[in-house]
Amino acid sequence: MKNLRYKFSSIEDILKDILEKEEVYIFGYTLEEETIHLVYLLKNGDINYGTLINGIWTKAQIGKFDIKSNFYNQIEVLYIDGKLNIFYAYSNYINSNIFTLHHVVYKDTIESRYDIIRYISKKSKTSFSVDFDSVGNIHLLYNTIVNDLSYVYYTYYSPHKGSWLRDPVKMSPDDKFNENPFVLVDTLDNVHAIWWEENPNTYILKYFRMSSSGKEKFKWLEINSLKIKSSVPKGILKQDRDIISLIYGDEIYYTIINSFDYGLNWKYFKDSSAISNTIEKEIIVDEKIDKQTKFKNKIDTQAKFRISEEDMDNTKIDQIINNQKELKMLLNNVLEELLFIKSKIAEIDENNQKNSFLKKLFN
Protein backbone atom coordinates (compact mmCIF):
# COMPACT_ATOMS: atom_id res chain seq x y z
CA MET A 1 0.00 0.00 0.00
CA LYS A 2 2.95 2.32 0.41
CA ASN A 3 3.38 4.75 -2.48
CA LEU A 4 3.57 8.50 -2.96
CA ARG A 5 -0.10 8.92 -3.75
CA TYR A 6 -1.09 7.03 -0.62
CA LYS A 7 1.50 8.84 1.50
CA PHE A 8 0.20 12.27 0.52
CA SER A 9 -3.46 11.36 0.74
CA SER A 10 -5.51 13.37 3.24
CA ILE A 11 -7.41 10.18 4.11
CA GLU A 12 -4.40 7.94 4.78
CA ASP A 13 -5.41 7.09 8.36
CA ILE A 14 -8.96 6.21 7.36
CA LEU A 15 -7.80 3.96 4.53
CA LYS A 16 -5.29 2.27 6.79
CA ASP A 17 -7.91 1.47 9.44
CA ILE A 18 -10.34 0.06 6.89
CA LEU A 19 -7.92 -1.95 4.79
CA GLU A 20 -5.99 -3.51 7.66
CA LYS A 21 -9.16 -5.18 8.95
CA GLU A 22 -9.48 -7.33 5.82
CA GLU A 23 -7.14 -9.35 3.62
CA VAL A 24 -6.87 -6.80 0.83
CA TYR A 25 -5.00 -7.71 -2.35
CA ILE A 26 -5.24 -4.40 -4.26
CA PHE A 27 -7.51 -1.35 -3.95
CA GLY A 28 -8.51 1.95 -5.53
CA TYR A 29 -10.20 4.95 -3.99
CA THR A 30 -11.43 8.47 -4.64
CA LEU A 31 -12.74 11.29 -2.48
CA GLU A 32 -15.90 13.05 -3.68
CA GLU A 33 -16.89 15.98 -1.45
CA GLU A 34 -17.42 14.35 1.97
CA THR A 35 -17.66 10.76 0.73
CA ILE A 36 -14.81 8.26 0.38
CA HIS A 37 -15.38 5.66 -2.36
CA LEU A 38 -13.23 2.57 -1.96
CA VAL A 39 -13.08 -0.49 -4.23
CA TYR A 40 -10.88 -3.36 -3.12
CA LEU A 41 -10.08 -6.92 -4.11
CA LEU A 42 -9.77 -9.49 -1.34
CA LYS A 43 -7.39 -12.41 -1.50
CA ASN A 44 -10.36 -14.76 -1.97
CA GLY A 45 -11.40 -12.92 -5.16
CA ASP A 46 -14.30 -10.88 -3.77
CA ILE A 47 -14.64 -7.32 -5.10
CA ASN A 48 -16.08 -5.00 -2.47
CA TYR A 49 -17.32 -1.44 -2.80
CA GLY A 50 -17.41 0.65 0.35
CA THR A 51 -18.34 4.23 1.19
CA LEU A 52 -17.55 6.32 4.22
CA ILE A 53 -20.08 9.13 4.80
CA ASN A 54 -20.05 11.21 7.99
CA GLY A 55 -18.05 8.54 9.77
CA ILE A 56 -20.43 5.73 8.76
CA TRP A 57 -18.79 2.90 6.82
CA THR A 58 -20.93 0.71 4.54
CA LYS A 59 -19.77 -1.95 2.10
CA ALA A 60 -21.14 -4.54 -0.29
CA GLN A 61 -19.75 -7.21 -2.58
CA ILE A 62 -20.20 -6.13 -6.20
CA GLY A 63 -18.30 -8.86 -8.03
CA LYS A 64 -15.93 -11.80 -8.02
CA PHE A 65 -12.56 -12.06 -9.77
CA ASP A 66 -10.94 -15.29 -10.90
CA ILE A 67 -7.71 -14.99 -8.92
CA LYS A 68 -6.82 -18.64 -9.56
CA SER A 69 -6.44 -18.03 -13.29
CA ASN A 70 -5.64 -14.32 -13.49
CA PHE A 71 -3.21 -11.84 -11.99
CA TYR A 72 -4.70 -8.43 -11.09
CA ASN A 73 -2.16 -5.67 -10.72
CA GLN A 74 -4.09 -2.39 -10.37
CA ILE A 75 -7.48 -0.85 -9.58
CA GLU A 76 -8.34 2.83 -10.05
CA VAL A 77 -11.60 4.57 -9.20
CA LEU A 78 -13.28 7.76 -10.44
CA TYR A 79 -16.65 9.13 -9.31
CA ILE A 80 -18.31 10.96 -12.22
CA ASP A 81 -21.85 12.40 -12.29
CA GLY A 82 -23.07 10.19 -9.46
CA LYS A 83 -21.63 7.01 -10.93
CA LEU A 84 -18.63 4.93 -9.91
CA ASN A 85 -16.13 4.26 -12.69
CA ILE A 86 -13.84 1.31 -11.96
CA PHE A 87 -10.70 0.58 -13.97
CA TYR A 88 -8.65 -2.58 -13.55
CA ALA A 89 -5.96 -4.46 -15.42
CA TYR A 90 -5.35 -8.19 -15.34
CA SER A 91 -3.35 -10.87 -17.11
CA ASN A 92 -3.75 -14.61 -17.34
CA TYR A 93 -1.07 -16.65 -15.59
CA ILE A 94 -0.37 -18.50 -18.85
CA ASN A 95 0.31 -15.26 -20.77
CA SER A 96 1.33 -13.19 -17.79
CA ASN A 97 2.68 -10.21 -19.77
CA ILE A 98 -0.51 -9.61 -21.80
CA PHE A 99 -2.84 -7.33 -19.83
CA THR A 100 -6.45 -6.41 -20.53
CA LEU A 101 -7.64 -3.05 -19.26
CA HIS A 102 -11.34 -2.85 -18.33
CA HIS A 103 -13.70 0.01 -17.51
CA VAL A 104 -16.88 -0.67 -15.52
CA VAL A 105 -19.60 1.90 -14.74
CA TYR A 106 -21.49 1.11 -11.54
CA LYS A 107 -24.53 2.65 -9.83
CA ASP A 108 -26.43 0.20 -7.61
CA THR A 109 -25.60 -2.35 -10.29
CA ILE A 110 -23.18 -2.64 -13.20
CA GLU A 111 -24.54 -0.38 -15.96
CA SER A 112 -21.89 -0.84 -18.64
CA ARG A 113 -18.56 -2.52 -19.36
CA TYR A 114 -15.79 -1.55 -21.78
CA ASP A 115 -12.70 -3.39 -22.93
CA ILE A 116 -10.34 -0.42 -23.31
CA ILE A 117 -7.20 -2.05 -24.64
CA ARG A 118 -5.00 -5.15 -24.52
CA TYR A 119 -1.33 -4.44 -24.08
CA ILE A 120 1.95 -6.05 -23.12
CA SER A 121 3.46 -4.93 -19.85
CA LYS A 122 5.31 -6.15 -16.81
CA LYS A 123 3.75 -6.90 -13.43
CA SER A 124 4.01 -3.31 -12.27
CA LYS A 125 1.56 -1.66 -9.90
CA THR A 126 1.54 1.51 -11.99
CA SER A 127 0.90 0.41 -15.56
CA PHE A 128 -1.91 2.97 -16.11
CA SER A 129 -3.32 6.22 -14.70
CA VAL A 130 -6.74 7.89 -15.14
CA ASP A 131 -8.44 11.21 -14.45
CA PHE A 132 -11.47 13.11 -15.81
CA ASP A 133 -12.42 16.64 -16.82
CA SER A 134 -15.44 18.84 -16.09
CA VAL A 135 -17.55 17.46 -18.95
CA GLY A 136 -16.89 13.82 -18.07
CA ASN A 137 -14.16 12.92 -20.57
CA ILE A 138 -11.85 10.31 -19.06
CA HIS A 139 -8.13 10.64 -19.84
CA LEU A 140 -5.90 7.58 -19.54
CA LEU A 141 -2.16 6.89 -19.83
CA TYR A 142 -0.86 3.34 -19.98
CA ASN A 143 2.52 1.66 -20.26
CA THR A 144 3.18 -1.10 -22.81
CA ILE A 145 6.23 -3.12 -23.85
CA VAL A 146 7.06 -3.87 -27.49
CA ASN A 147 10.31 -5.49 -28.67
CA ASP A 148 11.95 -5.05 -25.28
CA LEU A 149 11.18 -1.30 -25.30
CA SER A 150 8.55 0.32 -23.11
CA TYR A 151 6.18 3.00 -24.44
CA VAL A 152 3.56 5.32 -22.96
CA TYR A 153 0.24 5.70 -24.78
CA TYR A 154 -2.68 8.08 -24.29
CA THR A 155 -6.35 7.39 -24.90
CA TYR A 156 -9.63 8.88 -23.73
CA TYR A 157 -13.31 8.06 -23.22
CA SER A 158 -16.04 10.33 -24.61
CA PRO A 159 -19.31 10.24 -22.62
CA HIS A 160 -21.17 11.71 -25.62
CA LYS A 161 -20.08 8.88 -27.91
CA GLY A 162 -20.07 6.31 -25.12
CA SER A 163 -16.82 4.82 -26.36
CA TRP A 164 -13.03 4.88 -26.03
CA LEU A 165 -10.66 6.19 -28.69
CA ARG A 166 -9.94 3.34 -31.10
CA ASP A 167 -6.36 4.31 -31.93
CA PRO A 168 -4.40 5.38 -28.82
CA VAL A 169 -1.72 8.05 -29.25
CA LYS A 170 1.90 7.06 -28.65
CA MET A 171 3.46 9.70 -26.41
CA SER A 172 7.01 8.41 -25.87
CA PRO A 173 9.89 8.05 -28.40
CA ASP A 174 10.75 4.85 -30.24
CA ASP A 175 14.18 4.14 -28.79
CA LYS A 176 13.67 4.58 -25.04
CA PHE A 177 12.36 2.54 -22.14
CA ASN A 178 9.56 4.43 -20.35
CA GLU A 179 7.54 3.59 -17.28
CA ASN A 180 5.25 4.75 -14.43
CA PRO A 181 2.85 7.11 -16.25
CA PHE A 182 0.67 9.52 -14.26
CA VAL A 183 -2.08 11.84 -15.53
CA LEU A 184 -3.76 14.82 -13.85
CA VAL A 185 -6.60 17.04 -15.10
CA ASP A 186 -6.52 20.42 -13.37
CA THR A 187 -9.48 22.66 -12.50
CA LEU A 188 -9.20 24.47 -15.87
CA ASP A 189 -9.36 21.11 -17.73
CA ASN A 190 -5.71 21.21 -18.79
CA VAL A 191 -4.35 17.65 -18.95
CA HIS A 192 -0.89 16.95 -17.50
CA ALA A 193 1.04 13.76 -18.27
CA ILE A 194 4.30 12.57 -16.72
CA TRP A 195 6.39 9.41 -16.94
CA TRP A 196 10.02 8.35 -16.54
CA GLU A 197 12.48 7.68 -19.36
CA GLU A 198 15.31 5.29 -18.55
CA ASN A 199 18.84 6.54 -19.23
CA PRO A 200 22.26 5.21 -18.16
CA ASN A 201 22.41 5.25 -14.34
CA THR A 202 19.37 7.54 -14.01
CA TYR A 203 15.79 8.30 -15.03
CA ILE A 204 14.62 11.49 -16.75
CA LEU A 205 11.14 12.88 -16.15
CA LYS A 206 9.06 13.51 -19.28
CA TYR A 207 6.29 16.08 -18.89
CA PHE A 208 3.61 16.85 -21.47
CA ARG A 209 0.69 19.25 -21.23
CA MET A 210 -2.54 19.50 -23.24
CA SER A 211 -4.22 22.88 -22.93
CA SER A 212 -8.01 23.29 -22.84
CA SER A 213 -7.87 26.74 -24.49
CA GLY A 214 -5.77 28.99 -26.72
CA LYS A 215 -3.98 28.37 -30.02
CA GLU A 216 -2.58 25.02 -28.84
CA LYS A 217 -5.94 23.73 -27.61
CA PHE A 218 -6.15 19.92 -27.37
CA LYS A 219 -2.54 19.46 -28.52
CA TRP A 220 0.06 17.57 -26.51
CA LEU A 221 3.14 19.76 -26.00
CA GLU A 222 6.30 18.83 -24.14
CA ILE A 223 7.26 21.33 -21.42
CA ASN A 224 11.05 21.43 -21.56
CA SER A 225 11.42 23.85 -18.65
CA LEU A 226 10.93 20.96 -16.23
CA LYS A 227 14.26 19.08 -16.34
CA ILE A 228 14.48 16.41 -13.66
CA LYS A 229 16.74 13.41 -13.10
CA SER A 230 16.09 10.84 -10.41
CA SER A 231 17.41 7.48 -9.31
CA VAL A 232 13.82 6.44 -8.47
CA PRO A 233 11.27 6.48 -11.33
CA LYS A 234 8.26 7.43 -9.21
CA GLY A 235 6.21 10.61 -9.25
CA ILE A 236 2.70 12.00 -8.82
CA LEU A 237 0.90 15.26 -9.58
CA LYS A 238 -1.47 16.99 -7.16
CA GLN A 239 -3.47 20.21 -7.23
CA ASP A 240 -4.18 22.35 -4.18
CA ARG A 241 -6.14 25.50 -4.97
CA ASP A 242 -4.36 27.08 -7.96
CA ILE A 243 -1.07 25.29 -7.33
CA ILE A 244 -0.02 22.12 -9.12
CA SER A 245 2.67 20.12 -7.33
CA LEU A 246 4.98 17.46 -8.69
CA ILE A 247 6.22 15.07 -6.01
CA TYR A 248 8.87 12.54 -6.97
CA GLY A 249 11.15 10.09 -5.21
CA ASP A 250 10.01 7.54 -2.64
CA GLU A 251 8.20 7.66 0.70
CA ILE A 252 11.34 8.73 2.62
CA TYR A 253 13.37 10.84 0.19
CA TYR A 254 11.25 12.98 -2.09
CA THR A 255 11.26 16.37 -3.81
CA ILE A 256 8.36 18.79 -4.32
CA ILE A 257 8.17 21.24 -7.23
CA ASN A 258 5.28 23.69 -7.61
CA SER A 259 3.68 25.43 -10.56
CA PHE A 260 1.61 28.58 -10.06
CA ASP A 261 0.56 28.92 -13.72
CA TYR A 262 -0.96 25.50 -14.42
CA GLY A 263 2.21 23.74 -15.49
CA LEU A 264 3.96 26.30 -17.70
CA ASN A 265 6.68 27.17 -15.16
CA TRP A 266 7.92 25.33 -12.07
CA LYS A 267 9.63 26.30 -8.81
CA TYR A 268 11.39 24.08 -6.29
CA PHE A 269 9.65 23.93 -2.94
CA LYS A 270 12.04 25.29 -0.27
CA ASP A 271 9.90 27.17 2.24
CA SER A 272 10.01 25.22 5.51
CA SER A 273 6.87 26.92 6.78
CA ALA A 274 4.91 25.19 4.05
CA ILE A 275 5.54 21.79 5.63
CA SER A 276 3.33 20.67 8.48
CA ASN A 277 5.03 20.83 11.87
CA THR A 278 4.47 17.09 12.22
CA ILE A 279 7.30 16.55 9.73
CA GLU A 280 10.91 16.31 10.89
CA LYS A 281 13.07 17.29 7.95
CA GLU A 282 16.69 17.24 6.99
CA ILE A 283 17.55 19.31 3.92
CA ILE A 284 20.07 17.66 1.61
CA VAL A 285 21.44 19.57 -1.38
CA ASP A 286 22.37 17.39 -4.36
CA GLU A 287 24.65 19.38 -6.70
CA LYS A 288 24.36 16.73 -9.41
CA ILE A 289 20.62 17.16 -9.83
CA ASP A 290 20.22 20.88 -10.50
CA LYS A 291 20.79 21.72 -6.81
CA GLN A 292 17.44 20.18 -5.90
CA THR A 293 16.31 20.37 -2.29
CA LYS A 294 15.46 16.97 -0.92
CA PHE A 295 13.66 16.25 2.32
CA LYS A 296 14.34 13.31 4.58
CA ASN A 297 11.04 12.95 6.34
CA LYS A 298 9.59 11.18 9.27
CA ILE A 299 5.97 11.74 8.37
CA ASP A 300 3.03 11.66 10.75
CA THR A 301 0.06 9.88 9.17
CA GLN A 302 -1.95 13.11 9.02
CA ALA A 303 0.82 15.32 7.60
CA LYS A 304 -0.13 17.41 4.56
CA PHE A 305 2.01 19.88 2.67
CA ARG A 306 0.77 23.45 2.28
CA ILE A 307 2.12 26.37 0.31
CA SER A 308 3.14 29.49 2.21
CA GLU A 309 1.11 32.64 1.62
CA GLU A 310 4.33 34.63 1.19
CA ASP A 311 5.50 32.31 -1.58
CA MET A 312 2.13 32.60 -3.30
CA ASP A 313 2.11 36.40 -2.96
CA ASN A 314 5.62 36.77 -4.39
CA THR A 315 4.74 34.58 -7.34
CA LYS A 316 1.48 36.45 -7.95
CA ILE A 317 3.35 39.78 -7.86
CA ASP A 318 5.77 38.46 -10.49
CA GLN A 319 2.85 37.32 -12.61
CA ILE A 320 1.14 40.74 -12.27
CA ILE A 321 4.34 42.53 -13.34
CA ASN A 322 4.70 40.22 -16.36
CA ASN A 323 1.04 40.74 -17.25
CA GLN A 324 1.47 44.52 -17.02
CA LYS A 325 4.48 44.35 -19.35
CA GLU A 326 2.52 42.27 -21.85
CA LEU A 327 -0.44 44.66 -21.58
CA LYS A 328 1.85 47.65 -22.19
CA MET A 329 3.24 45.97 -25.32
CA LEU A 330 -0.28 45.27 -26.57
CA LEU A 331 -1.35 48.88 -25.96
CA ASN A 332 1.70 50.17 -27.83
CA ASN A 333 0.82 47.93 -30.75
CA VAL A 334 -2.77 49.20 -30.70
CA LEU A 335 -1.56 52.83 -30.65
CA GLU A 336 0.75 52.18 -33.59
CA GLU A 337 -2.12 50.62 -35.53
CA LEU A 338 -4.40 53.58 -34.68
CA LEU A 339 -1.75 56.05 -35.91
CA PHE A 340 -1.39 54.06 -39.11
CA ILE A 341 -5.16 54.04 -39.63
CA LYS A 342 -5.33 57.78 -38.89
CA SER A 343 -2.65 58.49 -41.51
CA LYS A 344 -4.52 56.38 -44.06
CA ILE A 345 -7.77 58.25 -43.34
CA ALA A 346 -5.98 61.57 -43.79
CA GLU A 347 -4.52 60.33 -47.09
CA ILE A 348 -7.98 59.27 -48.29
CA ASP A 349 -9.47 62.66 -47.30
CA GLU A 350 -6.69 64.46 -49.19
CA ASN A 351 -7.34 62.36 -52.31
CA ASN A 352 -11.08 63.00 -52.04
CA GLN A 353 -10.50 66.75 -51.84
CA LYS A 354 -8.25 66.63 -54.94
CA ASN A 355 -10.86 64.62 -56.86
CA SER A 356 -13.59 67.08 -55.85
CA PHE A 357 -11.50 70.04 -57.03
CA LEU A 358 -10.80 68.39 -60.42
CA LYS A 359 -14.53 67.64 -60.93
CA LYS A 360 -15.40 71.27 -60.31
CA LEU A 361 -12.59 72.42 -62.64
CA PHE A 362 -13.62 70.33 -65.66
CA ASN A 363 -17.43 70.34 -65.28
Image (spheres, rainbow, N blue to C red):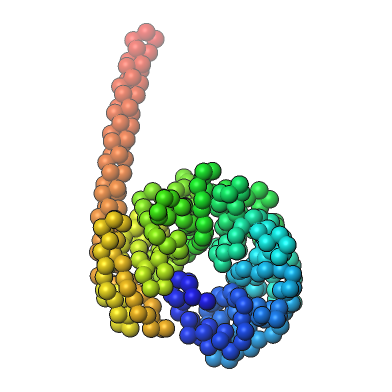
Relative to 270, residue 16 above or below:
below
Image location of residue 200, percent across then percent down: 41, 50
Image location of residue 136, percent across then percent down: 60, 63
Count of number-bearing discs: 0
Residue ranking furthest to the bottom: 56
Q: Residue at x 38, y 59 (%)?
A: 230
Image location of residue 212, percent across then percent down: 50, 54
Residue 347 in view: yes
Image location of residue 295, percent across then percent down: 31, 71
Residue 85 in view: no
Give residue 262's quadrant in the image: bottom left
Give residue 264's quadrant in the image: bottom left
> Of 81 and 152, which appears nearest the observer?
152
In the displayed structure image, the side of residue 328 where residue 155 appears, left or right: right
Residue ranking furthest to the top: 362
> Of 42 and 83, which appears nearest the observer?
42
Relative to 6, residue 336 above or below:
above
Quarter of the rendering occupied by the C terminus: top left
Give residue 301's quadrant in the image: bottom left
Q: Residue at x 41, y 64 (%)?
A: 248
Q: Residue at x 31, y 67 (%)?
A: 294
Q: Residue at x 60, y 76 (%)?
A: 27
